[in-house]
Amino acid sequence: MNIVEYLYACNASDTFRRLDAEFKKTFELLAAQPESGTPVKFTRYKHYRFVIVKPYYVFYVYKNGAVYIKRIIHTARNYKKLLAPDGNL
């Protein structure tokens, strides 16, 4: 199950409403302050930044005046393996 399926499955819950509000707040912050996220320290992904919307990592890039969300990964997952399945970070 991916994040969208999960959120739709929980759409009537307090969890969904909280996550929805947190994602909106975070995306508004990134639109206003795109360099506010933490830079990723992997050579392969040095242009990535991330923020945490508990319990998710939100990976994004800021390029040409726009923020592009690249991946949203649950903090329980091994994000290094998901970003680089070949182990080449």
Image: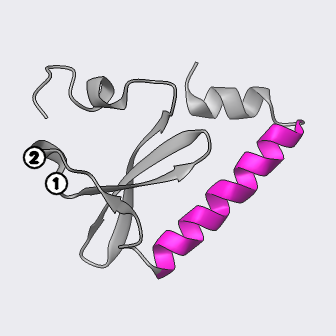
Q: In percent of the image, x 19 and y 58: which residue is there?
A: 47
Disc 1 residue type? Lys
Mark 1 and mark 2: Cα distance apart in space: 5 Å
Asked whether, in this view, residue 40 is left or right of residue 25, the answer is left
Relative vertical location of residue 45 with respect to residue 24 in this rendering, above or below = above
Q: In percent of the image, x 82 and y 48: which residue is there?
A: 17
Asked whether, in this view, residue 40 is left or right of residue 35, the answer is left
Q: Residues within 10 Å of mark 2 (few under 14, many from 20)?
A: few
Secondary structure category for the residue under label 1 = loop
The magenta-colored residue range is: 13-32
Q: In percent of the image, x 79 and y 49: which residue is there?
A: 18
Quadrant position of the N terminus in the picture: top right
Disc 2 residue type? Thr
Rendered image: mark on residue 43 = 2
Secondary structure category for the residue under label 2 = helix
Task: Give the overall secondary structure of the magenta segment.
Answer: helix
Q: Position of residue 87 (x, y in %)?
A: 14, 22
Quadrant position of the C terminus in the picture: top left
Q: Position of residue 83 (x, y in %)?
A: 27, 32
Rendered image: mark on residue 46 = 1
Nearest the eye: 45 or 5? 45
Relative vertical location of residue 36 with respect to residue 57 in this rendering, above or below = below
The answer to the question of whether label 1 and label 2 lie on touching residues, with beta carbons closer than 8 A, is yes
The image quarter containing residue 61 is bottom left
Q: Position of residue 37 (x, y in %)?
A: 40, 64
The image quarter containing residue 42 is top left
Residue 80 is a magenta residue: no
Q: Residues within 10 Å of mark 1 (few under 14, many from 20)?
A: few
Nearest the eye: 41 or 67? 41
Nearest the eye: 69 or 85? 85
Q: In percent of the image, x 36 and y 31: which residue is there?
A: 79
